[in-house]
Image: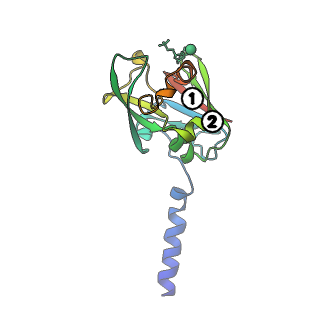
Amino acid sequence: MLRLASSLALILIATAPSWAGELAKPAAEPILKVQGAITTMNDGETAAFDLSMLDALPQHTIKATTPWYDGEHEFSGVVIGDLLETLGASGESVTVTALNDYSAEIPMEDIKDYPVILATRVDGEELSVRDKGPLFVIYPFDEHPDLYNEVIFSRSVWQVASLTVH
Ligand SMILES: Nc1nc2c(c(=O)[nH]1)N[C@H]1C(S)=C(S)[C@@H](COP(=O)(O)O)O[C@H]1N2
Ligand SMILES: [Mo]
């Protein structure tokens, strides 16, 4: 019995990092860097993700009509709130910065109130940089028509490269 208990203890010690919030390093080219008020990193002060790491997180689909595409489309990707929870993030807002250095501030309220996603795909197809990829902030415009306004459009950053939590 003592032996069983000590081998169990060893197993727990050996597997500890996987539940202590360790983040593997990206195997492919990172497409997203998260920094600021986070507790889980994999590259200095940064948490870097390649596409397959983002795909490994819970996925969410938003069917929505947006100013950027004709008609209704299915956007899928990672819920920003889930991503931030994985990283032990805390703060008042998230600065979202794009490849072209455009940036916008998303209040943490939005992330708590709505399943805002970092879309990796539209209608099942990967978003190319040419088509506002690799990551596009999408709000659930159809379920919440009140979101369909200029303020939220300005937070709908496309070609997202990084998030800073503060
Ligand atoms: N990467 C990136 N995302 C961006 C912007 C930008 O300039 N670059 N402009 C924002 C603003 S202020 C608005 S109103 C909408 C405008 O999108 P549109 O120019 O395609 O109409 O996108 C938002 N997302
Ligand atoms: Mo705008």
Q: Residue furthest toward the bottom?
A: 1
Query: Which image quadrant for residue 57?
Result: top left
Residue type, label 1: Ser
Estimate the x, y position of residue 45 in percent, counting from the top left: 65, 39
> Seen in the image, is 124 located left or right of residue 147?
left
Please tell me which of labels 2 and 1 falls first in the chain. Answer: 2
Which residue is labeled 1 in the image?
162
Which residue is labeled 2 in the image?
35
Crowdedness of circle 1 by 10 Å Cα count: few (<14), some, many (20+)?
A: many
In front here: 44 or 102? 102
Res. 119 visible in picture: yes
Q: What count of labels does the image hold?
A: 2
Residue type, label 2: Gln
**Which quarter of the rendering shows the C terminus?**
top right
Query: Which image quadrant for residue 97?
Result: top right
Residue at the location (38% across, 27% down)?
64
Estimate the x, y position of residue 42 in percent, counting from the top left: 57, 42
Report the Cα–Cα distance between label 2 and label 1: 8 Å
